Image (tube, rainbow, N blue to C red):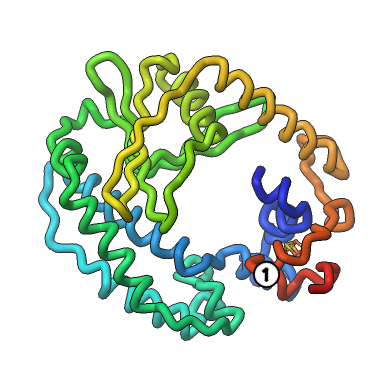
């Protein structure tokens, strides 16, 4: 939804233009859009590496096992090399690490800082009370670790992935790891999605949901509250966006056909600077 607001063409590339790009019979441009749709910048990569390592630990604890040391730096070294060698451009390798800095030849002088940041975040997790608390949970208490799920809103599927969620004595607790370098504000959209999903999946009302945002960069915790009026307001905004997206289609929502020409490019050239689709976006504004 964020892409749809920022640049409709960017939304089209990521939601429609890339479709079938994994198929060897696809045309060259569709294949290229598919590959570009997998690019992430180095700070998004940090988030992915840390989330994966934390999820791996928690999954092992949930299964009753113990984990050997996780070497974040070594993992990143292997992934960085794979991205630099553009392995993601080889057949059936599109899901390997693909960094926008490598694909667009962007000079980076802080790669060591990137690895250090990821290591710090992971160490902060290991030393946090959450590490011990989550380790002690029984299988019955766990509800999910980084599982992709969905619910329906206005007859459209909304996808959600919770970092960690478990039962408490009278409700549930959702733990959300943050690895950004800046303080994060409470995001009403994200909180509303959590509440709507919790109600759909487990019939849990908003006042029984605790959301703990854990800033792993600074080791700080923010307890976010979800209020019923706020959910209702955000839900209304989400439905309005969903209807606008459907109105843009060249077919019925069931057929879900979208044509590139119906999705205008942004007029703000500044937005294009970090866009992964610059290589295929011939209509983008001049900078
Ligand atoms: S390059 Fe600019 S105009 Fe094109 S999709 Fe990206 S943000 Fe939109």
Residue nearer the viewer, 277 or 91: 277
Residue nearer the viewer, 169 or 219: 219
Quarter of the figure with the N terminus: top right
Q: Is residue 72 left or right of residue 8?
A: left
Residue nearer the viewer, 269 or 105: 269
Place of residue 172 in the rendered image (x, y in percent of width and height, measured from the top left): 32, 23
Q: Is mark 1 within 8 Å of ligand 1?
A: no
Q: Is residue 283 left or right of residue 59?
A: right
Residue 116 drawn above or below residue 229:
below
Q: Quadrant of ligand 1?
A: bottom right
State whether residue 144 appears in this view: no
Query: Residue, x 23% and y 45% (percent of image)?
Result: 58
Query: Residue, x 14% and y 63% (percent of image)?
Result: 69
Quarter of the figure with the C terminus: bottom right
Place of residue 179 in the rendered image (x, y in percent of width and height, measured from the top left): 38, 54
- The total of numbered circles placed on residues is 1
Name the residue that disc number 1 marks.
Answer: 273
Quarter assignment of residue 129: top left
Quarter assignment of residue 96: bottom left
């Amino acid at each position: 939804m964020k892409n749809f607001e920022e640049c409709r063409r960017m939304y089209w590339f990521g939601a429609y233009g890339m479709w079938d790009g994994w198929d060897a019979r696809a045309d060259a441009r569709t294949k290229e859009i598919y590959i570009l749709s997998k690019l992430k910048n180095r700070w998004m990569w940090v988030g992915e590496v840390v989330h994966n390592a934390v999820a791996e630990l928690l999954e092992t604890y949930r299964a009753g096992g113990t984990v050997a040391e996780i070497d974040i730096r070594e993992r990143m070294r292997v992934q960085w090399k794979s991205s630099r060698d553009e392995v993601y451009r080889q057949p059936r390798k599109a899901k390997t690490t693909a960094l926008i800095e490598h694909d667009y030849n962007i000079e980076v002088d802080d790669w060591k800082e990137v690895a250090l940041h990821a290591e710090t975040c992971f160490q902060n997790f290991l030393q946090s009370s959450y590490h011990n608390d989550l380790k002690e949970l029984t299988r019955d208490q766990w509800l999910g670790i980084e599982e992709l799920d969905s619910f329906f809103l206005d007859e459209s599927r909304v996808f959600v992935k919770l970092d960690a969620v478990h039962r408490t004595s009278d409700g549930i607790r959702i733990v959300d790891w943050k690895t950004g370098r800046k303080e994060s504000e409470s995001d009403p959209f994200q909180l509303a999605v959590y509440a709507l999903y919790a109600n759909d999946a487990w019939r849990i009302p908003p006042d029984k949901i605790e959301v703990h945002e854990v800033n792993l960069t600074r080791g700080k915790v923010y307890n976010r509250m979800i209020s019923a009026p706020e959910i209702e307001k955000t839900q209304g905004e989400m439905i309005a966006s969903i209807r606008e997206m459907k109105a843009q289609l060249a077919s019925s929502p069931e057929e879900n056909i979208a044509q590139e020409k119906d999705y205008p490019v942004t007029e703000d050239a500044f937005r294009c600077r970090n866009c992964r689709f610059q290589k295929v976006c011939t209509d983008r504004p001049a900078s």
